[in-house]
Amino acid sequence: MTRGLAILLALLAFVPAPAPMQGQVADKAAQKSAPSAKQGTTQTPTVPPASTAEAPSQGSTDADTSCGGGPCPSQQPIVVTSPPPPAAPWTWHDRVLWGAYLVLAVLGYVGVLLVLRTLKRIERHVEVGAATAQAALDASDAALAQNQAMVEAERPWILITIEPFLTMENSFKVMATNRGRTPARIVGTVDLVGVAPDETHLPETPVFDNDEPGTLLEPVILLPGESLGIRRFSRGDVPLICKTREEMETIERWEEKIFVFGRVTYRDMISVPDKKLYQTDWCCRYIHGEKESAMVVSGPPKYNKHT
């Protein structure tokens, strides 16, 4: 700012003087030319007496012919112009006004420099604020991801196992067990029974009559480590599945196999209620023997998945 002020003062030094000062110089020049004007007025010719004026009148014809019909140059009158009016003096009011203009110009220049300096500071502050906001956003994203990871680590996990009935022979139950760290709320279950030669003949993805899981009569909450029976299957259910004797014989000869598959829908107890539900798909294969039967977890990967 000091360098810019010095440049401004140097430029003002080359500015020409104001008009009043030029007027004073013109006034002095007019005073010097005044004596010469007075001397010019004394050189005007005097009018000759009447007695002597008649003589030239007699030879007027000669004067007309010698000067082209007009007066000769020596006889023309001398015309003296009046000097220009003197310029107005440079009063103290004009001096104060000129000084005020100079001070205002300097103050304006200084003000512009201060405004530019302030704008640069504001720009730097804005850049710093933007960087701080971006860092805060990144930190919040990292905290959200960490929180989500903690929620996923603490979420419930429903796994499916097959257990035999202790009080009934050749009967089995499909058990849903919470292997997570937090309670799970069972929303609904759905299951189907299919007959196919092997796993490769099952549909590519499990298809249920209704995509929506069946709603339980009462809400079920499984604490970590607790289990719930969601499906029962016994040897006595095979005749109900095989409608004809021929189909029953194919099951007994293991030409056809019975598959029981289903889905369990649940949610955790620590997230918001409208969060996406979790699902566990399961599939089992029934083995029909002559006297005893068995049931094992089987099926393609898409029939045994967790979300």
Image (cartoon, helix red, strand yellow):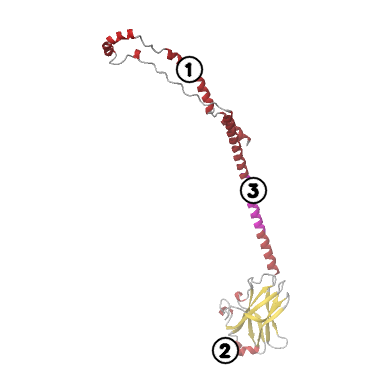
> Marks 2 and 1: CB-CB under 8 Å?
no
Q: What's drawn in magenta, residue-wise?
A: 120-139
The mark closer to the camera, 3 or 1, is 1
Residue 46 sits above or below residue 184 on the image: above
Q: Which residue is mark 1?
A: 34
- The residue under the point 66% across, 73% down is 267
Q: Which residue is mark 2?
A: 247
Mark 2 crowdedness (10 Å alpha carbons): few <14, some 14-19, many ≥20? some
Find the distance from the CA under tag 3 to the CA under tag 2: 82 Å
The mark closer to the camera, 3 or 2, is 3
Q: Which of these two is toward me, 128 or 98?
A: 98
Which amino acid is tagged 3?
His
Mark 3 crowdedness (10 Å alpha carbons): few <14, some 14-19, many ≥20? few
Q: Is residue 296 magenta?
A: no
Q: Which of these two is toward me, 196 or 3?
A: 3
- The residue under the point 69% across, 64% down is 147
Residue 151 visible at all: yes
Q: Is residue 126 magenta?
A: yes
Image coordinates of residue 149 in percent, x first then y, are 68, 65
Image coordinates of residue 187 in percent, x first then y, are 65, 77
Comes first in the chain, label 3 or label 2: 3
In the displayed structure, does residue 117 sit left or right of residue 19? right
Which amino acid is tagged 2?
Glu
Q: Quadrant of the C terminus?
A: bottom right
Q: Main secondary structure of the magenta part?
A: helix
Comes first in the chain, label 3 or label 1: 1
In the displayed structure, does residue 306 sit left or right of residue 54? right
Q: Which residue is mark 3?
A: 125
Which amino acid is tagged 1?
Ala
How many marks the image carries: the answer is 3
For label 2, the SS is: helix
Query: Which of the 4 quarters of the picture holds residue 74?
Result: top left
